[in-house]
Image: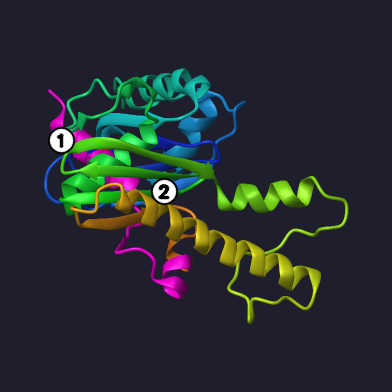
Amino acid sequence: MKYILGVDTGNTNTVFGLFAPDGDFEILHHWRTVSRRDRTSDELGIFLIGFLQAAGIAVDSIGGFLYSSVVPSFNPIVERMARDYFHCSALRVSHELPMGLEYDYPRPDEIGADRLVNAVAAHTLYGGDLIVIDMGTATTFCKLHGNRYQGGCIAPGLKLSIEALWRNTAQLPPVEFVRPEAVTGHSTIKALQSGFYYGWIGLLKEVISELKSENPERTYRTVATGGLSALIQSDARIFDVVDPLLTLRGLKAIYGKKP
């Protein structure tokens, strides 16, 4: 069997997924590494070969390669890696690919590849009217009416916000994102944890509510992925669906639509 490799290059992490070209949306294996801007194509190729070997997958069993990227400087590195190590021409995700989406959006070329991939996955897997949330380096919200991409919102990422507060203040320590015992914190750490937890619960609920209120005649499902979405869901039950592999499933869906 020939396998397909999908790569999602984000600002913080690069995620690799292995899947069969046919069948359902199962991701056979997936791996994660840091998106270092100074990493060479050789380093990336050796990383990926190591992952494949650990999973018992032969390099010559790779028959296709596609990637999404929000780091343009990384694109030629990924493409050269695909060519040199897997003898594949890498297909890059953009709005110009046949993905089954239509755009009620003046400039679809401005939509990040990660948002496109998530939209394709959510539409393919869940259908209907959707709000898709990705809690990565940025927190993105995308609204879909069927297969028509409407737009959305972009907020800072949760981890990025925690790190920014710590790095730009003299006395506030870094904290773990957890649900506090009470809203009123009785120490600096507890106060920070309360502020981040309830602040982000409030942000998510309010943005989702406002997006829904623009079209009150529609019934939306919320689909979340990335970052701490599973932790937030376990406590707050904000989302209808949490799919940690949504982006990789979107890459598989897009590959299946290629000409």
Q: Quadrant of residue 141?
A: top left
Instruction: Give me the disc on residue 183.
Output: none
- Residue 174 in the magenta stretch? The answer is no
Rendering colour mode: rainbow
Q: Is residue 92 left or right of residue 20?
A: right
Q: Is residue 47 left or right of residue 129?
A: right
Residue nearest the observer in this picture, 178 or 11: 178
Q: Position of residue 113 (x, y in %)?
A: 37, 31
Q: Position of residue 121 (x, y in %)?
A: 24, 45
How far apart are the two marked residues, 2 and 1, measured between alpha carbons? 23 Å
Q: Residue furthest right?
A: 170
Q: Position of residue 168 (x, y in %)?
A: 79, 45
Pointer 2 or 1: first along the chain = 2
Q: Quadrant of residue 109?
A: top left
In the figure, 36 relative to 138: above or below? above
In the figure, 51 relative to 151: above or below? below
Which residue is identified by label 1? 256
Could you tell me what secondary structure mostly forms the magenta stretch?
A: helix
Residue nearest the observer in this picture, 144 or 39: 144
Q: Residues within 10 Å of mark 1 (few under 14, many from 20)?
A: some
Which amino acid does the dot numbered 2 rest on? Asp
Instruction: Name the element at disc 2.
Output: strand
Which residue is identified by label 2? 134
Q: Which residues are magenta?
A: 232-259
Instruction: Name the element at disc 1.
Output: helix
In the figure, 235 relative to 116: above or below? below
- Residue 245 in the magenta stretch? The answer is yes
For the point 28% across and 24% down, which residue is it?
A: 95
Q: Nearer the viewer, mark 2 or mark 1?
A: 2
**Count the marks: how many?**
2
Which amino acid does the dot numbered 1 rest on? Gly
For the point 28% across and 38% down, which residue is it?
A: 251
